[in-house]
Amino acid sequence: MKKDIFKKAIQKNTEAIPLSLLETESKIKKDFIILDELRDFISPLSKEESEGLEQDIIKDGISDPLIIWETTPEIAGLKNAETKTVYVLVDGHNRYRISQKYNLDFRIILRNYNGIQEVKDSMLNKQLNRRNLTLEQISYYRGLKYNNVIKSQEGLPKTINVAFNLAKEFKVNEKTIRRDSEFAKGLSKLSPELRQEVLTGKTKVNKSDIVNLAKVNTDEAQDLNSSQEIAKTIKREKGKSPHIGESIPLNINDLENSIRELAMSKLDKQLCLILLEKVNALINYL
């Protein structure tokens, strides 16, 4: 009976990879891993949401299967894996946490992805479709989506205006998307705990301060734990670089990408001035 239920779960998704043996299912359930970089893409549940999900699962069990990505250690970015195949949790982190707390069984579906960037894009789309996101979460996920697309196109000809396409998709302007990108980069320099507090609104930090963190070298800012540390880092870096507090990225690759994106945009006077400013900054680097 359990095997039949498992097969039905697989058939619900045409992209699923069939599992032929119950032993294989049990082994994957035992051996799959959770990547921090993927878990951090998930908005934390509020206390009410977490308690509600827990009560529903206690009452009805875990009805939705967990989504698992079958891949290789190299593609998943794992350097010391001892096996040729690894299984990575993509969707169902909260359900899995509750299953472990109460020793509950769950179903799984294996799904193919072309790489870690496609996994992230799929997770971001799911998060952006959630209800009741805070403004900070919306900005963060739009920025992550932009950064993810840009990273996936590294080394390829710049033929697509990513900011324009995302601005059209989310009904905002291109400048908002680029600012979201900097916001996401800045948040990546906070500790996971502080990042989630900022995203949920529990801790208030000026968005401009987070954006300015994106321009600080990673060696100078990583895992910041408080708004005081953020302010201190920005103040310290302002003395080292005239660009801190401006809309010019310090990383030369980011600067080049920003110039290309602007050059492909429909330019007005304001965007022309920003473009000129960034070109001058690039000249100073060269």
Image (spheres, rainbow, N blue to C red):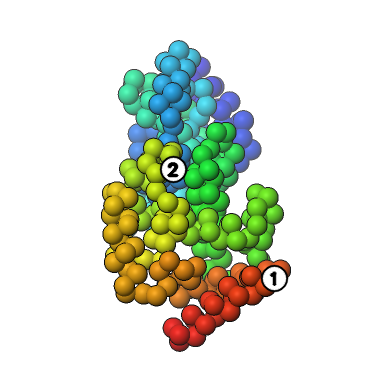
Which callout, 1 or 2, points to the residue nearer the camera? Answer: 1
**For residue 240, what is the image quadrant?**
bottom left
Residue 213 visible (yes or no):
yes
Nearer to us in this view, 7 or 249 = 249
> Residue 105: horizontal and vertical position, in percent?
41, 22
Amino acid type, callout 1: Asp
Q: Which residue is labeled 1 in the image?
A: 268
Residue at image location 35% in from the left, 34% down from the top: 30
> Would residue 99 appear left or right of 112 to someone viewing this image?
left
Q: How far is mark 1 from mark 2, CA to CA?
A: 32 Å
Nearer to us in this view, 262 or 146 = 262
Query: Mark 1 Cα within 10 Å, few/some/many (few <14, many 20+)?
Result: few
> Residue 232: horizontal and vertical position, in percent?
28, 59
Amino acid type, callout 2: Leu
Residue at image location 39% in from the left, 44% down from the top: 204
Q: Which residue is labeled 2 in the image?
A: 199
